């Protein structure tokens, strides 16, 4: 029979091992990241290792890849003159965009939103009734070639829009907003052609409320297809729906690409030369090029302080590095992409949240800045994050935001945040770029439990997001840019 002393020693060893396991899995140091506060600042110089001219092609990919940058980042071709969004500005823009996307989808079903009903009762101005989203919240741009010979165009990236457009000459300062690059001049391109008004391509605009009737060309010999898009942030664009050669990369040219040649604008500035639509409707770039690239595409959004990411058309031949969750259309609107969130963890600890509160799903929206969660998940996340960051002073906020004053700190310890999606796919967000924006927790509340939320571009940063059209899934690959 074993002695009592030997039994006690065995018990202590086992108990000590259990405590060590709990420490590693629960509040272990691996679940926190020490980051320098200097990493929150945008670099002044684009390093050669991250510049657009030295972007390495994505491995195992048969399609085309182009550089992608933040419009305030060090590698932007023509950095925007406006200042990067403060958290308060980003939050406002994200809410405007989210409200508009919801309004667009519900109007497609002939439904009035709760917000609109409230505004009508209060006598406020309702959200515009046409398709589009808030352009002010879009942060990332790509540079493509349009026309023959190709003319560079800097375009905002948007998964919440379908129709691509650029400002076209001739257009005076009262009709078009000022931009750094010369206006695209279709008269100087040998491959430009307006789309006839009676064509099936033109008629397809009507089903998405993008048509603007017909107009005669300059010599009055042909009826041209007019388009119109009105955005929630106040931007309106209209012009001639046209075809043109689109150069993605050397040797990668899309012939007869359908886009809007804009002659009348309102509400924008020099953020870009136009917009590139990546939604799911027929007018978008992925759908138009599905015969070439299969309808799939991916992108990696770099942090503001970093250099270059990428936009790629076509899926990799080997997707073993990705984790996939099912993806569907949002309310059959044909544009937005929807996934289902099932859980959240902070600092390695899974939050206790009933799965039913996630039933509304998340719209995956690279044009939105901040992620929106239903009330219970947001409250649980905010509480856990604040507890983990208790060492740092909170900035008082009327909106109960979670913003910190890091003045005087050379580095800070930030908890990892992970999102779990349908199928058990868990994605660790980049720290700090995928968690913090302007020193604030980059999440907000979308509405009641079960309400639709949004996955914003902050949470996507450094991830390759693969929209697999054939497989109906969204793939995540960490550390891609």
Image: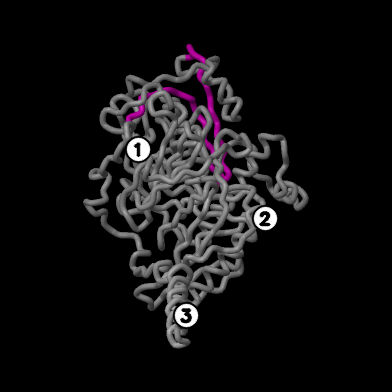
Measured Cα–Cα span from mark 2 to mark 3: 46 Å
Dominant secondary structure of the residues highlighted in magenta in the image = strand
Q: In this rendering, would 329 be left or right of 187?
A: right
Q: Secondary structure at mark 2?
A: loop
Residue 270 can be seen in this image: no
> Which quadrant of the view contains residue 178?
top left
Q: Is residue 73 visible?
A: yes
The picture places residue 217, in percent across and down from the top left corner, at 47, 18
Q: Nearer the viewer, residue 184 or 95?
A: 95
Which image quadrant is residue 321 in? Answer: top left
**What SS does tag 3 mark?**
helix
Q: Tell which residue pokes out farthest to the top in this image.
A: 221
On screen, 186 above or below 269? above
Residue drawn 49% across the image and 46% down it: 367
Picture residue at 42% right of the left edge, 54% below the top: 82
Does the segment drawn in magenta span residue 232? yes
Is 70 included in the stretch rendered in magenta?
Answer: no
> Which comes before the other along the chain, label 2 or label 1?
1
Residue corresponding to mark 1? 318
Task: Identify which residue is drawn at 49% across, 32% down.
Answer: 163
Q: Which residues are magenta?
A: 220-248
Whole-percent x, y for residue 32 in the image:
42, 68
Task: List x then y, in percent, for residue 298.
Answer: 40, 40
Q: Which residue is most to the bottom?
A: 5
Residue holding disc 3:
11
Quick check: marks 2 and 3 in contact, CB under 8 Å?
Answer: no
Q: Which mark is residue 449?
A: 2
Q: Where is 29 relative to 306, above or below?
A: below
């Amino acid at each position: 029979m074993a002695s009592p002393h030997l039994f006690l020693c065995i018990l202590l060893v086992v108990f000590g091992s259990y405590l060590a396991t709990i420490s590693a899995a629960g509040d272990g140091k691996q679940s926190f990241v020490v980051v320098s506060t200097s990493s929150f600042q945008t670099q002044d110089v684009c390093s050669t290792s991250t510049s657009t001219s030295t972007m390495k092609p994505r491995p195992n990919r048969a399609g085309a890849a182009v550089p992608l940058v933040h419009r305030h980042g060090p590698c932007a071709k023509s950095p925007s003159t406006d200042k990067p969004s403060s958290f308060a500005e980003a939050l406002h823009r994200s809410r405007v965009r989210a409200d508009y996307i919801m309004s667009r989808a519900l109007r497609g079903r002939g439904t009035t939103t709760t917000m609109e009903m409230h505004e009508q009762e209060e006598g406020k101005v309702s959200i515009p009734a046409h398709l589009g989203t808030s352009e002010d919240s879009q942060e990332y741009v790509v540079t493509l070639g349009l026309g023959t010979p190709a003319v560079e165009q800097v375009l905002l990236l948007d998964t919440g829009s379908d129709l691509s457009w650029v400002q076209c000459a001739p257009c005076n300062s009262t009709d078009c907003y000022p931009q750094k690059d010369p206006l695209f001049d279709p008269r100087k391109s040998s491959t430009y052609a307006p789309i006839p008004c009676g064509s099936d391509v033109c008629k397809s605009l009507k089903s998405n409320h993008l048509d603007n009737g017909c107009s005669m060309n300059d010599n009055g010999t042909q009826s041209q297809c007019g388009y119109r898009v009105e955005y929630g942030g106040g931007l309106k664009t209209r012009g001639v729906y046209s075809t043109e050669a689109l150069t993605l990369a050397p040797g990668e040219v899309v012939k007869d690409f359908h886009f809007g040649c804009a002659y009348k604008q309102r509400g924008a500035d020099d953020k870009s030369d136009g917009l590139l639509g990546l939604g799911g409707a027929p007018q978008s770039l992925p759908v138009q090029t599905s015969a070439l690239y299969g309808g799939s595409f991916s992108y990696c959004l770099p942090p503001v302080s970093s250099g270059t990411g990428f936009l790629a058309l076509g899926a990799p031949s080997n997707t073993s590095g990705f984790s996939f969750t099912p993806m569907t259309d949002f309310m059959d609107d044909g544009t937005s992409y929807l996934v289902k969130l099932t859980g959240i963890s902070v600092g390695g600890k899974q939050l206790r949240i009933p799965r039913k509160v996630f039933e509304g799903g998340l719209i995956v929206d690279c044009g939105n800045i901040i992620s929106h969660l239903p009330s219970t998940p947001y409250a649980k996340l905010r509480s856990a994050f604040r507890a983990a960051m208790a060492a740092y002073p909170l900035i008082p906020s009327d909106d109960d935001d979670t913003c910190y004053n890091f003045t005087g700190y050379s580095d800070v310890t930030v908890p990892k945040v992970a999102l779990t999606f349908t199928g058990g796919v868990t994605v660790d967000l980049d720290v700090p770029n995928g968690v913090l924006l302007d020193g604030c927790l980059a999440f907000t509340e979308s509405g009641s439990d079960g309400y639709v939320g949004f996955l914003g571009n902050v949470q996507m940063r450094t991830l390759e997001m693969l929209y697999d059209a054939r497989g109906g899934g969204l793939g995540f690959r960490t550390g891609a840019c």
